[in-house]
Amino acid sequence: PQLTLAGNRSVLGGGELDLSAEYVHFAHPTPGSAEGSRATFYPSLAWPMGGTALTVIPKLGVHHTQYSLDTPLSGGRDSITRTLPIFSLDSSVVFERDTTWGGRDMIQTLEPRLYYVNVPYRYQDDIPNFDSGLYDFNFTQIFAENIFSGGDRIANASQITAAVTSRLIDTDTGAERLRAALGQRYYFVDQRVTLPGVAARTGRRADILASLGGRISRSTTIDTGWQYNPRDSITERFNFDIRFQPGFAKVINAGFRYTRDVLRDLDLSAQWPLGGRWYGVARYNRSLRDHRVTEALAGLEYDGGCWVFRTAFHRFATTDDDVTQALFLQLELNDLASVGSSPLDLLRRTVGGYGTINQPLADPVFGRE
């Protein structure tokens, strides 16, 4: 069972008082595994200062955790307490200038940001690991207090993240047309809190993160991300995605994903009218590293006005040697009932921007995902 509590309120002088609390009891089917309960209590006080252009937010919190174990530890203890102060300072500035792009008036922003966090070291190897793991390294995580998910590990830290973001904003509509970002984290102390079997971080500089995305035309959007390792001068991860979507139920997606020594994938998918109320849907995902198709889908849809017919064949590689295959057939009477196995969840998951053809209220450009 799990119980959570969260609340916040403004305090005198513009401060923001936050409280998060959680109680969880963990049970494990494997004999000999640690079992017990964990109670977490984390109050914090943030004090935003500045205005629309400059913002500085100091924050101080106390993270308290209490464990009550069903089986005593090797030293005979069946309870553990951990209390840690956490301090952070988040500062950002927004600069703006008028410009034009594609013949339209735009506002271009330049948004530097510095984020510092300090957490003292506490020995935690005697604390069982019920649910903690390493967060994925991305732009969200480099502005987080803790590198670990869950509640069993809190990393010691004295580090600063420096980043800059630039946006192009349409003056008439206020829509963001393009965004670019660059960021890196710098460490002032060595990592001492780790997970079992995971080596501690080395070096004072984290990988550099870069991203570029937005709508480069009315029908075309792009999204790209890059993680560069400056210590070894090598790319750790890279992704590039482009979507062409000129209208409802008309979409073509292409993507490439790379993770060093792990994957190098090509991903293609589409939904397109074939004429005569017929629509085609397809997806093709290929591992260029392993020279094999990891996922493939081909399907047809027919819009009969008050009814829809769908069929799809799906092939998915579960391991290097095993493949699962499925055939879907569905006849759906609009707002009434359907017969057969529905491929809709599969189509929405595998074809980005997929439009459900018998939903007349769907967005005429982006459909419904």
Image (cartoon, grey):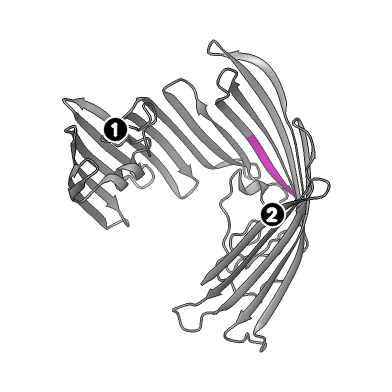
* Percent x, y of residue 221: 46, 27
Please say if 296 is above or below 35: above
Residue visible at 62% across and 27% down in the picture: 167
Please say if 101 is above or below 267: above
Residue visible at 64% across and 20% down in the picture: 107
Q: Is residue 294 visible?
A: no
Tell me the element at label 1.
strand
> What separation in Å lies between label 1 and label 2 (alpha carbons)?
45 Å
Magenta stretch bounds: 182-187
Total marks in image: 2
Mark 1–mark 2 CB contact (< 8 Å): no
The answer to which of 234 and 213 lies nearer the viewer is 213
Q: Disc 1 residue type?
A: Gln
* Percent x, y of residue 191: 71, 60
Disc 2 target residue: 8
Residue visible at 63% across and 80% down in the picture: 68
* Percent x, y of residue 286: 33, 42
State the predominant SS element of the stretch in magenta: strand
Report the residue that reaches farthest toward the top: 103
Say which label, 1 or 2, has the lower sequence index. 2
* Percent x, y of residue 210: 60, 36
Q: Which picture quadrant has residue 275?
A: top left
Report the residue that reaches farthest toward the bottom: 76
Tell me the element at label 2.
strand
Badge 2: residue crowd in 10 Å (few <14, some 14–19, many ≥20): few
- Horizontal side of residue 104 vs 208, given as left or right: left
Residue visible at 24% across and 27% down in the picture: 273
**Magenta segment includes 27:** no
Q: Is residue 262 visible?
A: yes
Q: Disc 2 residue type?
A: Asn
Numbered mark located on residue 271 in the image: 1
